[in-house]
Amino acid sequence: MKINIGKFKKTNDRRKINVQIDYYDTWSLDHTLALVIYPALIQLKNTKQGIPSELVNDVGGEYWSEQDSFDFYKETHQESWEIAAKRWDETLDKMIWAFEQLIKGDYDDKYHHGTSDYDWVKTDKTFPNPITGKIEDTFQMVDKDPNAHWYDHAGHMLHDEKIQEGLELFGKYFRSLWD
C-alpha cells in the first residue's frame, strides 16, 4: 500500500491524492488499515483543537448554546468544556488502544500459559484419499500433558470485548475525527 495525500491548497484546487492498494494489503485488511489509523489517531489526539458537539451538548445540558446570556452558564462553561474534553480524550484513548492491539497481533499470547506438547497418534479409522482414492490411516493429536498448560478464555474474551469497544467508538465518532 502506498498513500500520498498532499496538503490542502490555499486556492480552491483539490489536493493531490494517490492511493495504491496491492493484493497483499487486503489479505488482512483490518491489520493494514490499523497500521494507518493508529498513528493518525495519536496525531489527532496530540493536535486536536475541538471535540464532538454531542459530548459538549451532553455536558452543557439541553440548549446549552442558547444559555450563553445567563451568568451562571458563563461561570460553568469552562468547567463543562473541560469535562467534555476529558471524555473525548478517554474515547480517543480507547480507540488508540484497540488499534494498537490489532497492530501488535500477539495480545492473545498472554492468555496461553505453560507449554503444550502434542503427539500424533494413529487411530483405528481410515479415510480414502480424495486424489488417489487409496485408503489411508488417520491420526489424532493428543496432548502429552494437559496439566502443563492452560488457557484463560474469560480473560481473552474480556480483552476482545475491550478491543471491540474501541472499534465501535471509532465507527460511532468517525465523522468527528477531524481537527
Image (cartoon, rainbow, N blue to C red):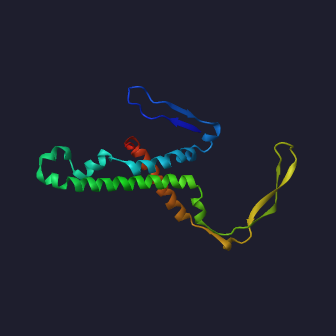
Q: How many marks?
A: 0
| Residue in the picture at 37% in, 54% down | 89
In this image, 104 relative to 64: left or right? right
Q: Compare residues 155 and 10 and report the one nearer the observer.
A: 10
| Residue in the picture at 20% in, 44% down | 65
From the viewer's perspective, is residue 88 above or below residue 23?
A: below
Q: Compare residues 45 and 84 and report the one nearer the observer.
A: 45
> Percent position (x, y) of residue 101?
53, 55
Answer with the quarter of the image where residue 106 lies.
bottom right
Q: Residue furthest front?
A: 10
Quarter of the picture containing the C terminus is top left
| Residue in the picture at 16% in, 43% down | 66
Answer with the quarter of the image where residue 53 lies.
top left
From the viewer's perspective, is residue 18 above or below residue 59?
A: above
| Residue in the picture at 39% in, 45% down | 173
From the viewer's perspective, is residue 6 above or below residue 156?
A: above
> Percent position (x, y) of residue 146?
68, 71
Q: Residue furthest bottom?
A: 147
In this image, 69 relative to 140: left or right? left
Quarter of the picture containing the N terminus is top right
In this image, 85 relative to 170: left or right? left
> Percent position (x, y) of residue 9?
41, 31
> Percent position (x, y) of residue 78?
22, 54
Q: Compare residues 46 and 56 and report the one nearer the observer.
A: 46
In this image, 61 relative to 40: left or right? left
